[in-house]
Image (spheres, rainbow, N blue to C red):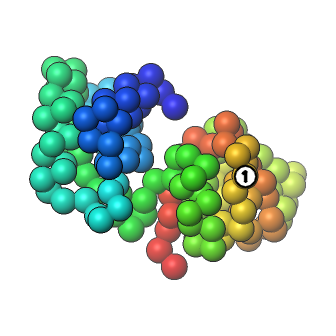
């Protein structure tokens, strides 16, 4: 987790404990995109409250606060566990051997989430079942069935 994401998560925990930070990412060096979630769904009012809470960051970034949508990001072990049985795309930081052709490593795996421990996620992808440590994941999200 980046220091910026940790800072935003801390602020939310103190001010809006029911709102969960899913992902905070800087795009192009100027845009800060923040995805939030709530057990009852995300409302426009929640997005507005989070925007106000992060207003000081608008000096450095344009700020986008939104719900995760159908292709929600997966960033924590609890997210992966919650969606075991669903399809996801996992992109790794470095190429990894793939089951279908170990001589040609890949960085993107798509398949069914079949397990999630505290240390890694297990995905049944086209080339077979692969376990990927969370530290090796660059980005991951659910995909439509």
Question: Could you tell me residue 78's position as x and y percent?
Answer: 57, 53
**Drawn side of residue 89 relative to residue 16, left or right:** right
The structure residue drawn at horizontal position 15% and vertical position 28%, both measured from the top left corner, is: 55
Nearer to us in this view, 9 or 3: 9
Q: Position of residue 33 (x, y in %)?
A: 30, 41
Q: In this image, 40 relative to 138: left or right? A: left
Q: Is residue 93 shown left or right of residue 50?
A: right
- Please, is residue 29 above or below residue 103 in the view? above
Q: Is residue 45 at least partly visible in the picture?
A: yes
Label 1: how many Cα within 10 Å (few below 14, some 14–19, many 20+): few
Please say if 59 is above or below 85.
Answer: above
Residue lying at the far bottom in this picture: please name it.
145
51 up-or-down from 80: above or below: above
Image quadrant assignment for residue 53: top left
The quadrant holding residue 81 is: bottom right
- The residue lying at 12 percent from left, 53 percent from top is 45
Residue 115, given in percent of the width and then of the height, sits at: 72, 62
Residue occupying the point 63% across, 74% down: 85
**Residue 140 visible within the image:** no
Using the image, determine if residue 93 lies above or below residue 127.
Answer: above
Front residue of 77/86: it is 77
Q: Which residue is mark 1?
A: 117
**Residue 58: horizontal and vertical position, in percent?**
17, 26
Total numbered circles: 1
* Element assignment for label 1: loop
Residue drawn 78% across and 54% down? 131
| Residue placed most toward the observer, 92 or 80 | 80
């Amino acid at each position: 987790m980046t220091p910026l994401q940790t800072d935003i998560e801390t602020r939310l925990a103190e001010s809006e404990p029911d709102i969960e930070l899913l992902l905070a990412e800087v795009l192009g060096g100027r845009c800060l995109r923040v995805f939030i979630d709530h057990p009852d769904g995300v409302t426009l009012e929640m997005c507005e409250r989070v925007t106000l809470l992060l207003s000081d960051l608008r000096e450095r970034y344009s700020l986008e606060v939104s719900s995760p949508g159908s292709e929600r990001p997966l960033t924590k072990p609890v997210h992966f566990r919650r969606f075991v049985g669903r399809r996801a795309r996992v992109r790794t930081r470095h190429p990894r051997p793939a089951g279908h052709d170990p001589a040609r490593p890949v960085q993107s795996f798509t398949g069914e989430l079949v397990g999630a421990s505290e240390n890694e996620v297990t995905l049944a992808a086209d080339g077979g079942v692969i376990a990927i440590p969370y530290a090796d994941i660059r980005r991951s999200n659910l995909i439509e069935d």
